[in-house]
Amino acid sequence: MSKRFDAAVKGMLEYGPSDWPALAGFPGRKAKVTDADVSTVSAASDKVLRVRGKPDWLMDINFQAGPDASVPQRVHLYNTLLVDRHGLLVRSLVVLLAPRANLTDINGVYVQQFEGEEPHLTFRYRVIRVWQLPAAQLLAGGLGTFPLAPVSDVTERDLPRVIRQMKARLDAEPRPDAKELWTATYLLMGLRYEQLLVDRLLREVVSMEESVTYQAILQEGFAKGRAEGRQEGALQESRKNLLLVGTKRLGAPGAETAAALEGIADLGRLEGLIARALEVSSWEELLESPGRFRRRRKRTP
């Protein structure tokens, strides 16, 4: 997932971990955040919940704000590694935060098969498209999913009403982490609406007595935005250079390859791909992990 919304959406799972199994169709289950690290293979999921049951099981949650064709393969990898690490069954969930993340490949099924043969692997995962969720469901649900309401199935005309309803509920249910919930709301609204509109709407619902809280929300959001903006600028420059070098050497990339490149959020990997583009003969070979299907050479004693 793009780091622009990373802290906001991951924090939402901390506010109400049990709200996320409910949103995915498993209501009434107690859950807590557990270890998402699978660093033995240099990978980590966005967030993993341990859901209480007979027996307990894990929910692996991955947020996506932009297009990335590698999502199904990565989610399958995380699922397999988490089963191995924790010894529990895992349900995988992909949460698409904006329509631009809605690639046709992210359809709830990941298949591996050789041409002309039956699939030898079929992996199923759940997909939630936030912009299709009813706002009423999120406004009445747990606070862990509450900040998604403004980017759910609402029009810009409905947005002031949704924000007022959010404030009414938070006023009725005071929480010490209300600022964090508003900060997550502020950042998520930037996925869909112009920043001037977001600022105006939040100012309208925050009273003068709460102006210090609102300024803290803005400062936190702007600080994250500046840091993430610098990172995103470096990523965009590297993607641009990779496209220039790759197109000259390998020809124009197809739509799926372009989407995969757009989804790479690792600056080091992009820089490595630029160097490798001078050594390979196709985009497919470039995006394939070096040595993935090669037998490792034995070291000479």
Image (tube, rainbow, N blue to C red):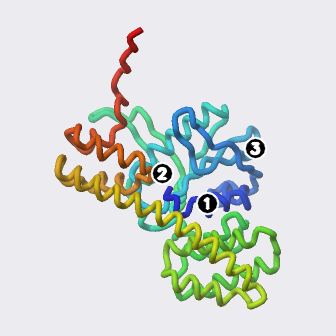
The residue depicted at 72 percent of the width and 67 percent of the height is 143
Q: Secondary structure at mark 1?
A: helix
What residue sits right under mark 3 in the picture?
53
Q: 203 or 58: nearer the eye?
A: 203
In the shown orientation, is residue 246 left or right of residue 185? left
Examine the rendered structure and indicate whether residue 221 appears above or below residue 195. Answer: above
Dots 1, 2 in contact, CB < 8 A: no
Tell me the mark number nearer the camera, choosing from 1 and 3.
1
What residue sits right under mark 1 in the picture?
7
In the rendered image, which quarter is residue 171 located in? Answer: bottom right
Question: Which amino acid, mark 3?
Answer: Gly
Q: Secondary structure at mark 2?
A: loop
Examine the rendered structure and indicate whether residue 275 appears above or below residue 168. Answer: above
Q: Earlier in the sequence, mark 1 or mark 3?
A: 1
Residue 219 image position (x, y, % from top left): 63, 75
Question: Which amino acid, mark 1?
Answer: Ala
The residue depicted at 51 percent of the width and 45 percent of the height is 75
Residue 106 image position (x, y, % from top left): 43, 54
Q: 156 or 10: nearer the eye?
A: 10
